[in-house]
Amino acid sequence: MKAVIFNQHGGPEVLQYADAPDPTIKANEVLVEVKACALNHLDVWARSGLPGVKIPLPHILGNDTAGVVRAVGELVSWVQTGDEEK
């Protein structure tokens, strides 16, 4: 998959558009093919680094997403493959 990541804290110059491993889901998780993603203040704070908050690196940005459900874990019953997530 493609992702916007950073490997170190800093300004916008640390952002990279990169290949990332395809995620695997657990029994209670959903895999969404992201069609749109917004970067917000949470992403800026994570990228900049917050004193006392450890963020594992590399870090994939983007919490506000919209897309299509591509897989559901065996315990998931509230969405189905093909549903739109907004």
Image (tube, rainbow, N blue to C red):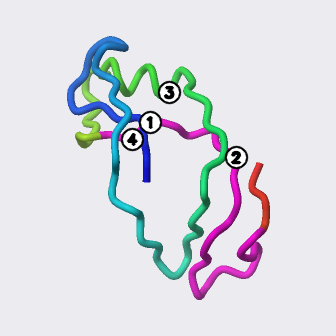
Label 1 vs label 4: CA separation? 4 Å
Residue of label 4: 60
Evaluate if marks 1 and 2 touch, with contact meaning CB atoms under 8 Å apart.
no
The three-letter amino acid code for the residue at tag 2 is Ala
Q: Residue at x 61, y 50 (%)?
A: 34
Residue bearing the label numbered 2: 66
Vertical relation: 53 (above or below) 28? above
Q: Earlier in the sequence, mark 2 or mark 3?
A: 3
Q: CA distance from mark 1 to mark 3?
A: 9 Å
Q: Quadrant of residue 70?
A: bottom right
In this rendered view, identify the residue nearer to me: 41 or 8: 8
Residue ID for mark 1: 61
Eye-nearest disc, 1 or 3: 1
Q: Is residue 84 left or right of residue 60?
A: right
Q: Earlier in the sequence, mark 1 or mark 2?
A: 1
What is the x, y in percent for residue 79? 75, 73
Q: Is residue 81 magenta?
A: yes
In which quarter of the view is residue 23 placed? bottom left
